[in-house]
Image (tube, rainbow, N blue to C red):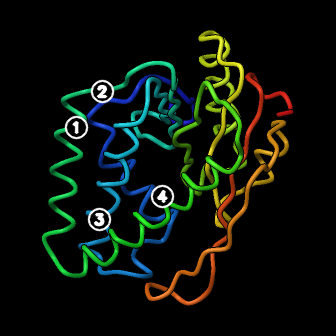
């Protein structure tokens, strides 16, 4: 049935649809060319795949409409297949001057995230490494089901505390409703890619979804 939602681990056949969701969710084409936006979406997904032990894709029919990934920080997650895909994605971006400019800004964002994590001075067993739902599927319950499946995985792995990075373009209210607490914040300038600023957040909770203390 077209309206029925199925859940399973990620497959290579999902990549293109998920890259399109990434591109539209974070509006890559608003601050760079369509070509670079497409390559950055591929790179972002590749970097997420490098940093996970668990994936769950939501599908309506055979079409991916959302995904969640988790990382058990107590385990190694190296995959040669994902590493090679990541390297190819990086080369595809930095081959052009425009791509290098955009990639540098994204690398800067990652540095801020890691600084927020260090400043928390907390020990974490896990990370909710990536979570996105296609815009037209938000409010349908798909996101909550994906989140619950991630919590089931973390609980099964006996992860005591986990964190996630998010920002002001996302629905942070969803995380608050699930019992996560904001433990870090940073105001970040989007110049020269865009005008304005972005609020970067670090959220945390005790698995599965209890308030972080």
- Mark 1 → mark 2, Cα distance in angstroms: 7 Å
Tell me the quarter of the picture where residue 154 sits.
top right
Instruction: Tell me the residue at 35%/80% (across/down).
Output: 32
Instruction: Tell me the residue at 51%/19% (across/down).
Output: 74
Q: Secondary structure at mark 2?
A: loop
Closer to the eye: label 3 or 1 = 1
In the image shown, does 31 or 141 lie closer to the viewer? 31
- Mark 3 → mark 4, Cα distance in angstroms: 19 Å
Q: Secondary structure at mark 3?
A: helix
- Mark 4 → mark 1, Cα distance in angstroms: 18 Å
Q: Is residue 106 left or right of residue 117?
A: left
Instruction: Tell me the residue at 61%/26% (across/down).
Output: 150
The residue that disc 1 covers is 83
Mark 1 vs mark 2: which is more N-terminal? 2
Closer to the eye: label 3 or 2 = 2
Q: Residue 151, relative to residue 66: is it above or below?
A: above
Instruction: Indicate the position of residue 136 as horizontal and vertical percent values.
Output: 59, 55
Classify mark 2: residues with Cα within 10 Å, few (<14), some (14-19) or many (20+).
few
Res 130 label: none
Q: Are marks 3 and 1 in contact (CB under 8 Å)?
A: no
Q: Are marks 1 and 2 in contact (CB under 8 Å)?
A: yes
Mark 3 vs mark 1: which is more N-terminal? 3
Mark 3 vs mark 2: which is more N-terminal? 3
The residue that disc 4 covers is 110
Tell me the quarter of the picture where residue 82 sits.
top left
The residue that disc 2 covers is 78
- Mark 2 → mark 4, Cα distance in angstroms: 19 Å
The residue that disc 3 covers is 38
């Amino acid at each position: 049935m077209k309206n029925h939602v199925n859940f399973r681990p990620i497959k290579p056949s999902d990549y293109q649809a998920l890259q399109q969701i990434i591109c539209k969710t974070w509006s890559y084409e608003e601050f760079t060319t369509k070509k670079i936006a497409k390559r950055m979406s591929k790179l972002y997904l590749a970097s997420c795949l490098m940093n996970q032990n668990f994936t769950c894709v939501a599908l309506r029919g055979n079409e991916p409409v959302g995904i969640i990934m988790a990382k058990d920080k107590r385990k190694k997650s190296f995959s040669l297949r994902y590493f090679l895909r990541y390297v190819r994605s990086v080369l595809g971006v930095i081959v052009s001057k425009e791509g290098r400019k955009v990639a540098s800004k994204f690398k800067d964002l990652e540095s801020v995230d890691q600084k927020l994590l260090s400043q928390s001075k907390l020990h974490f067993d896990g990370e909710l490494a990536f979570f996105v739902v296609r815009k037209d599927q938000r409010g349908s319950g798909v996101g909550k089901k994906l989140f619950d499946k991630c919590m089931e995985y973390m609980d099964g792995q006996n992860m005591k505390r986990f964190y996630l990075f998010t920002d002001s373009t996302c629905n942070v209210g969803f995380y608050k409703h699930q019992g996560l607490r904001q433990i870090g914040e940073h105001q970040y300038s989007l110049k020269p890619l865009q005008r304005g600023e972005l609020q970067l957040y670090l959220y945390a909770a005790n698995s599965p979804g209890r308030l972080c203390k």
